Amino acid sequence: MNITENNRKLILDEFEYVLESIAMAESMEEKLYLLSALHGAVNRVMNIEFDSDLIFLHHALSTTHAAFSARYDAMKNKKAFPLHITKEIFDKLFLLISKLYDCLKNNSEIDEILKGLIVLAYTTTGNGYYLYQKGLIRL
């Protein structure tokens, strides 16, 4: 990602805060709420300094957050049967966010992690969950 160190620091600071807060959060609602701050921070930086990697990062984070939030709301309202977000899926989400932070901090390649987030978001859909149950989507 080709952005200034100041803007990289803005994104990294937000990731640090979110990761620390998620570790202390007790409810999934709170964790998903905190997760929304990440694509917001990327969007703010993107409006100051453009880089195509920022669009990819923003889109992956935004899409993942929206997918998980929609599925979680459906589960909470008992409209999700038989689709569930398993503990394994939630754990993988936060592991990928942590790995993404490390890559951003080290200015290393993020494409594989973003791909992983999109695949994980797909598990919140009917077909994605089916593929996960069949073992075709492995976490």
Image (cartoon, rainbow, N blue to C red):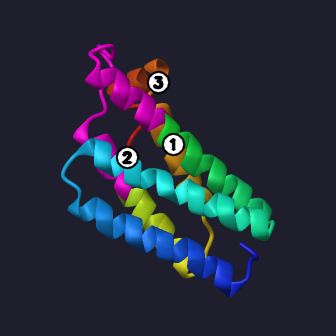
Residue 32 - label: 2
Report the mark closest to the observer, 3 or 2: 2
Residue 13 in the image: state x and y as whole percent: 49, 76
Q: Quadrant of residue 88?
A: top left
Predominant SS along the magenta part: helix
- List the residue tagged with mark 1: 64
Magenta region? 67-94
- Earlier along the polypeptide chain: callout 3 or callout 2? 2
**Residue 74 lies within the magenta run:** yes
For mark 1, does the 10 Å Cα neighbourhood hold few (<14), some (14 to 19), or many (20 or more) residues? many
Residue type at the position of mark 3: Thr
- Earlier along the polypeptide chain: callout 1 or callout 2? 2
User: Does residue 122 appear anywhere in the picture?
Assistant: yes
Residue 10 - label: none
Would residue 79 appear left or right of 11 to someone viewing this image? Answer: left
Q: Residue at 39%, 40% (x, y): give it.
A: 138
Q: Quadrant of residue 20?
A: bottom left
